[in-house]
């Protein structure tokens, strides 16, 4: 996958200025930042929930293995 270099980044910023104008660009950047922050927070919560569920299930599985072996 190709990386975005300086010329591509300049082109993207120029297009954003043309499309949204200099007045709306800071608001757009702030909205994108909030969206990314919320996405990271949600994915962190999901990861913690999964890890908690796994840690709760592991002891039960070990008890079942011991019961079967007995």
Image (cartoon, rainbow, N blue to C red):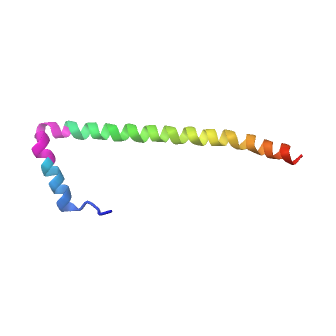
Which residue sits at x=19%, y=59%?
8
Percent of width and height locating residue 49: 56, 37
Which residue sits at x=79%, y=42%?
64
In which quadrant of the rendered view does residue 3 lie?
Answer: bottom left
Front-most of residues 59 and 30: 59
Front-most of residues 67 and 39: 67
Q: Give the answer, above or below, for where 4 lies relative to 49.
A: below
In which quadrant of the rendered view does residue 1 lie?
Answer: bottom left
| Residue ranking furthest to the front | 68
Which residue sits at x=52%, y=42%?
47
Q: Main secondary structure of the magenta part?
A: helix
Percent of width and height locating residue 53: 62, 38
Residue 31 located left or right of residue 37: left
The total number of labels drawn is: 0
- Which region of the structure is painted magenta? 16-26
Residue 44 located left or right of residue 39: right
Percent of width and height locating residue 50: 57, 41
Q: Give the answer, above or below, for where 69 lies relative to 48.
A: below
In magenta stretch: residue 54: no
Residue 46 located left or right of residue 69: left
In magenta stretch: residue 17: yes
Which residue sits at x=17%, y=40%?
25
């Amino acid at each position: 996958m190709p990386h975005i270099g300086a010329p591509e980044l300049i082109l993207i910023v120029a297009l954003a200025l043309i499309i949204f104008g200099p007045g709306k660009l800071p608001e757009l950047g702030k909205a994108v930042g909030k969206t990314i922050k919320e996405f990271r927070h949600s994915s962190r919560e999901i990861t913690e929930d999964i890890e908690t569920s796994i840690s709760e299930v592991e002891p039960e599985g070990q008890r079942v293995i011991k019961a079967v072996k007995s």
